[in-house]
Amino acid sequence: MLLFSDLDGTLIDEHQQLSDINRQKMYQLQDNGHQIVICTGRNILEMIPTIQMLDLPFDYLVLNNGAHILNQQLETLYEKVIDKNIGIDILNHTMTYQHMWSYFSDGHINLAYKDGITYDHAIIGQPPIDKDYKQAYQKVDHYQIICFNQDNHQIDEAQICYDYVMNHYSDYVEAYFNTYFVDVVPKGCSKGHGMKELLNIIDYHGDTYAIGDSYNDIPMLQQATYGYTFDKVNQDIQKHAYKIIHDFYKIIDDMLGGI
């Protein structure tokens, strides 16, 4: 069996911690011959330090909401990107809002920006750096993912930016709300799309389990044989789940118990 798991808010908590019982159960699942796929909106530059810091068990990574798939050796199996000119216009627009965080990654650099300051988003703690954010994103060849969110965790202006993206570029990109963040990825990409691509790549035809806590997880829950979510999340997400649980490790108990 394959377990597809969201990362933030699902597998790890708001303090970026993986509980001992979750880690133990994940290794137990692998020891029983099953595989784990981390399915997240994060990019590879964000994932590498997280994997190292948390001793995170995984067999595959589905990143950028389905646009980038890697194996356990971090070799790329599949990738789609956002056109440079489209990405530049979206980033130009997000920078016009005060207190709006803006992020981009091309797979080699991963920068963030807010109120005139550029940050290295690839380093835990996100230190400020002496670099012009606009010049940096204009120099890249393409974008793996673009994100934005309000500093106050509200979504009113983020929704305006979301609408701008979808009104101008819905033929070329997808945009997903992940709590108060908005992730922009290439057209046709979603966590459900990433699941299907990986299953085709490894020629897998068995049962799949998936678990997530946010709106960008819905395509993954729908694609899985058995989709799980939590009792704490919005009912709009719960209605897409096969089962609602309180703790992440309960899905592994079900898998190992034959449910």
Image (spheres, rainbow, N blue to C red):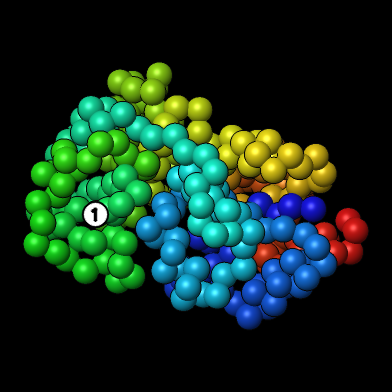
Q: Nearer the viewer, residue 247 or 102?
A: 102
The answer to whether 230 is drawn above or below residue 240 in the figure is: below
Which amino acid is tagged 1?
Ala
On the question of residue 159 being in view, the answer is no
Residue at position x 82%, y 67% in the image: 32
The answer to whether 38 is drawn above or below residue 104 in the figure is: below
On the question of residue 107 being in view, the answer is yes
Quadrant of residue 120 within the rendered picture: bottom left
Residue 149: x and y in percent read 31, 48
Q: Secondary structure at mark 1?
A: strand
Residue 249: x and y in percent read 71, 68
- Quadrant placement of the C terminus: bottom right
Residue placed furthest toward the bottom? 20
Residue placed furthest toward the right? 258
Q: Nearer the viewer, residue 124 or 14?
A: 124
Q: Is residue 247 left or right of residue 75?
A: right
Q: Nearer the viewer, residue 3 or 231?
A: 3
Check disc 1 and report the residue beneath it.
112
Residue 193: x and y in percent read 59, 35
Residue at position x 37%, y 42% in the image: 145
Q: Nearer the viewer, residue 246 or 165?
A: 165
